[in-house]
Amino acid sequence: MARRRPQVVIGVCGSIAAFKVAVLHKHLRDHVDCTVAMTPSAQQFVGAQTFLALTGNPVITSLWEPSYAKPKHIDLADTLDLLLIAPATANILGKAAHGIADEAVSTLLMSVLPDERPVVFAPAMNTRMWKHPATRDNVKLLGKRGCHFVYPESGDLACGWQGEGRLAEPEVIAAHVLRLLKVDAKKTAR
């Protein structure tokens, strides 16, 4: 009998780094099944059709999906093994820390309890935004609640700056996800 592959939902937020999720999926696809949920801002950077083509799964872009009998965010929360938010913006970190659920990704975040299933944030933002006291407080609060982080790296940022805030490399994020799922990448390759 074939073993069920782990189910990962990737919440994509509005950052130029959203394009890296396609590369991240490449590192995950042989080991897990992925579904993507997108914020309205993320859709300004990458189209939902991209993730549909890559994952083969419908992309969640709205709370108002008429083709589902029960709300899709609840359906996903019931079946996922890990929720990954990448890129995680300052906005989504604030929403998650303070219980704001007003679009598909933030509502999904409120539907998953980090003590039941891993919730992982991979932040990406301008250096000042990453260092802002509000962002730091939100990261600390989410960490205390049991959320995991793949912290941003230093380097060239899309805004022209250099510094901390660059999305971690896709293979680093994938390795963290697979480790949390206890998936041996060598054994599960197709």
Image: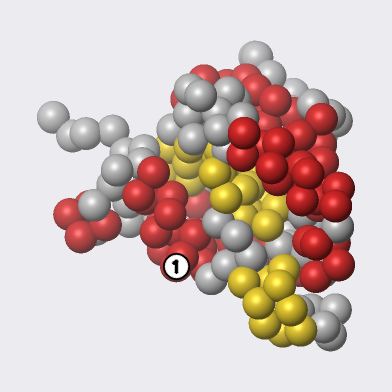
Q: Which residue is mark 1?
A: 171
**SS type, badge 1:** helix
Query: Measured from the top left, where is residue 92 in percent x and y?
Result: 78, 44
Query: Measured from the top left, where is residue 145 in percent x and y?
Result: 61, 30
Residue name at image x 62 percent, y 72 percent: 153
Query: Measured from the top left, where is residue 66 in percent x and y?
Result: 74, 24
| 100 is higher (above) or lower (below) than 92 | above
Say whether residue 4 is left or right of residue 11.
left
In front: 54, or 122? Answer: 122
Residue name at image x 70 percent, y 45 percent: 139
Say whether residue 91 is left or right of residue 114.
right
- Name the kind of residue labelled 1 in the image: Glu
In front: 65, or 137? Answer: 137
Residue name at image x 18 percent, y 34 percent: 2
Query: Measured from the top left, where is residue 183 in percent x and y?
Result: 28, 47
- Does residue 4 appear in the picture of this structure? yes
- Does residue 20 appear in the picture of this structure? no
